[in-house]
Every structure is written in structure tokens, then in C-alpha cells.
Image: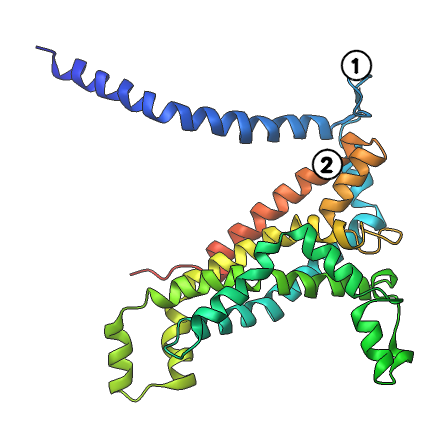
Amino acid sequence: MLSKSATQRKAFWKSVLFVLPGVAITVIFAIYPVINTFWLSLNDWNGVGGSAVTWVGLANYVKTLTSSKFWNSMLNALYFMIGGFVVLMPIAFGMALLVTSKMKGTKFFKASYLMPVMLGTTAVGLMWKFMLNSDFGVLAQFLNAIGMGDSVINWLATPTVNIWCIVLVNEWMYAGYNMLIFAAGIVAIPDEIHDAALLDGCTGMSKIIHIVFPLCKNMFMVFSVLCVTGCLKAFDIVWSMTGGGPMDTSATPAILLYTQGFQYKLMGRSAAIGMILLVLGLVLSLLLNNVIFKQEDM
């Protein structure tokens, strides 16, 4: 028979074998790319295999952080966050309240709310790009038809206006997806709590404020983390509608990362932007988890 220590060693190595595939995947597809990107951000390279890689230290970070284009892209990311918390969150929560209610027609609402997500980001972006066209778009034609033709502008080519158009389209598209997050929290509230609230006369808006909101705190945390990280890496909807233009006025950090690396061949600068976004995303996520949504001690 095996000794106690031998049995423990055998159990240990069995555990290692079970954990090893997950660790290997994490190292290969997460840790190594981050380390490699950090190393690249300290060098100057044009992205062509075999070309010279020149050490520049923190120069890429300095150039990035002193670039007006970078700070404009961060401002656009901030617009996405404002739209997410001010527009998307209340709409998604209201939709969740609707589809989890006992009123008739909730199946129709569930299907219709999820349709924009199922269309795909590029399809949605191109659809709204044509709809917002100032020459033949639906919105321009409607304003002309009701005598408000003077209000028609080139929405996707006007600075600040273009990014807000993209933000609102993004909220329209992802409202159904975020509805599922809040709906999961609402349906997880035990029926006993609803019955107790009813006996105490807590109904309607009072019930939502005092019962549903507090018990959906974790769902709001999940939404907040996804919103912040998603806004920092917003790319596809912006690229399909404006390509970040004109003159990078609607560019987000992810758009800037792409153009710097693959259009201007500044791979080191692109890597520096990626590392800044990684650190910023981690800091904001930790801030949300440990400060704003800090769990109360039992």
C-alpha cells in the first residue's frame, strides 16, 4: 500500500494535470500576448517581418499621452460611457421590468428587443449609416417632408454630433442584451420577498426602489464593468459607421490603436495604446468592484 505522503503526492499531481490545460491556455492566449505587447510598446517597429526593431523606451507612451488625437478618442470613449449609464442602463432595466412582468405580450417584447443584437454590429452600423445620410436617408427625408429641411445636416460628418449618433445607435443595439442581465437579477428575487412586500403595502415604484434595486445590485455591477470595458474597446460600430472620421473626430481608442498600427505602421505606438487601455480598464473595474459596489460586511 502507498504511504500517506505518496497518496498526497499522487493526488497533487492528478490535480496539476487537471489544471494544466486551463493554465496553458491562459498563459498562451492571455499572459504571453500582454507581455509581448508591453515589450513591443517599448520599441519602434513598422510591422514588417524581418525589419529592424528599435528600442525607444517610454517614447511611445509619451507621444501617445501628449497626442491630441488620443485625448479626443478618450473623450469619445467617455461619451460612450455617459450614454451607457444615462441612456442604456435605465432603458435596459425598464425593458427587463417589462419582460419579467405578468402582463400579456411579453414574448413579443422579448423577441423584438433582441432583434438588433442578432442583426450583427456591421449590419446595424451600415443600416444606420444609410438612414442618417443627409441626402437620401430616412431621417433627412422625414424632416424635409414635414418642412424642417433646414435642420438636416451631415450628422456623421459633423464633429461631436457624429460620435453621439454612434453612441445612440450603440445603445439601441445593445439594449436587449443588457436587458437580459437585469432580467436575470429580477427573476432571481424569491417570490417570498415579493409576497412580503405586497403584505406591507410596498407596490409599484416603491417596490422597485426599495426591493428590486437593492437586490439587483450585483447585476448593476456586472453592467457597469461590461459598460466601462466595452466603451474603452468600442470599435466595430464606429468603424462601420464613420471609420473614425472625419479627421479622427469620431475615433475611439480602439480605432486609434488600429489606425496607428495597421495604417501608419507605428506598431510600437499602437501597442502603447493597448497597454494604456488594459491598465485603465483594470483600474476602473477594480474601482467599480471595490469602491462603488463594495460588498457590505455581514
**Position of 115 compared to 209: left or right?**
right
Disc marking residue 243: none
Q: Which residue is located at x 74 percent, y 28 percent?
A: 42
Residue 1's image quarter?
Answer: top left
Q: Position of residue 273 (x, y in %)?
A: 72, 40
Of all residues, the one furthest to the right in this rendering is 150
N-terminal label among 1 and 2 = 1
Identity of the residue drawn at 53% across and 54% down: 225
Going 80% across and 51% down the picture, which residue do you hit? 244
Is 249 placed above or below 204 here? above
Q: Quadrant of residue 22?
A: top left
Q: Extreme bottom residue here?
A: 201
Total marks shown come to: 2
Specify the quadrant of the image occupied by residue 164: bottom right
In front of the other: 236 or 193:
236
Instruction: Identify the residue at horizontal 37%, vertical 81% (top origin).
Output: 207
